[in-house]
Amino acid sequence: EVQLLESGGGLVQPGGSLRLSCAAAGFSFSTYGMRWVRQAPGKGLEWVSAISDSGVTTYYADSVKGRFTVSRDNSKNTLHLQMNSLRAEDTAVYYCARGSKGSGWPDWGQGTLVTVSS
Amino acid sequence: EIVLTQSPGTLSLSPGERATLSCRASQSVSSSYLAWFQQKPGQAPRLLIYGASSRATGIPDRFSGGGSGTDFTLTISRLEPEDFAVYYCQQYGSSPYTFGQGTKLEIK
C-alpha cells in the first residue's frame, strides 16, 4: 500500500521560512516523479512544484518560483519543499502526490497546514 | 499555461440522477493527459479518471470520462449519496500543471 505522510507545517510569520517533508512508503520511490499541490482555505487546488524521479529536473508554479525549492532524498524515500520569503497568500494545506503520465496522480498524502500570519 | 474552465460552478441534483460536468481547456491537452478528481471536506483529492477516460483503481463504473483536445466531460451515470462533493479537472501533460476551479455537486 502506497503511503505518503507530510510533516513540517505550522505557523510562521510573513517573510519566514519553513521546510516541509513527505515520507514515502509502499512503492519504489526513486522511480517516480513527485509533486506538491496546495489548497488555500475554502479554495481550489493549486499545483506548486514537481521533481523528476532522479531529482535532476524540477518545475515550479510562477507564484512560488524563486522562493520555494523542491528536493528529494531517494536513499531516505523522502521529498522536501523548502519555502522561503513566505507570504500570507502561501497559507494553505500542502499535499505531496505521486504521479506519472501513465497513471495520473493516484496517491496523495493527508496534507500539512501552513499558516503565514503575524 | 493551459487554463481549465469548469462548468457549471454548482450542480444541484438528486440521488439517482445523471450528472454531467464539463472542463474546457484554453489549448489542446497533449495526449489527453486530463484527469478528474473528487474531493470531500477535510480529505485529500481522490483520482477518479486519468488519460481523459481511464478509471483509476477502485473507481465504480458509474464514473466515466470522455473528450479530447480542449473539451472534456465527467459523467456520473446514477448519483449515489456519497458522490456529492467537489470535482476538479486537471491537466498533467505539461508544466505548469493546472487544475480547474472546481464544480460543486450538491444535493437538490
Image (spheres, coloured by chain):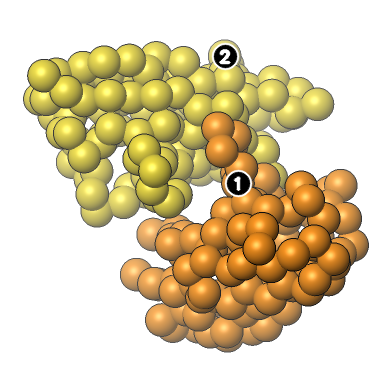
Chain colours: A yellow, B orange
Residue B62 placement: quadrant: bottom right
Q: Nearer the viewer, residue B83 or A83?
A: B83
- The structure residue drawn at horizontal position 42% and vertical position 51%, both measured from the top left corner, is A44
* Residue A12 in sight from this viewpoint: yes
Mark 2, other Cα within 10 Å: few <14 / some 14–19 / many ≥20: few
- The structure residue drawn at horizontal position 39% and vertical position 72%, both measured from the top left corner, is B3
Helix, strand or loop for disc 1 = strand
Q: Nearer the viewer, residue A12 or B28?
A: A12
Q: Quadrant of the C terminus of chain B?
A: bottom right
Q: Amino acid at mark 2?
A: Lys
- The structure residue drawn at horizontal position 62% and vertical position 67%, both measured from the top left corner, is B12
Where is residue A94 drawn, in percent x and y?
42, 32
User: Which chain does the residue under circle 1 lie in?
Assistant: B
Where is residue B50 drawn, in percent x and y?
70, 61
**Left or right of B71, for residue B76:** right
Residue B101 placement: quadrant: bottom left
Where is residue A13 drawn, in percent x and y?
14, 18
Q: Nearer the viewer, residue B2 or B17?
A: B17
Q: Is residue B21 above or below residue B67?
A: above
Mark 1, other Cα within 10 Å: few <14 / some 14–19 / many ≥20: many
Reading the image, the residue beneath label 2 is A76
Closer to the camera: disc 2 or disc 1? Answer: 1
Reading the image, the residue beneath label 1 is B39
Q: Is residue A10 above or below residue A101?
A: above
Q: Is disc 2 in the same subunit as disc 1? A: no
Where is residue B39 drawn, in percent x and y?
60, 46
* Residue B87 in sight from this viewpoint: no
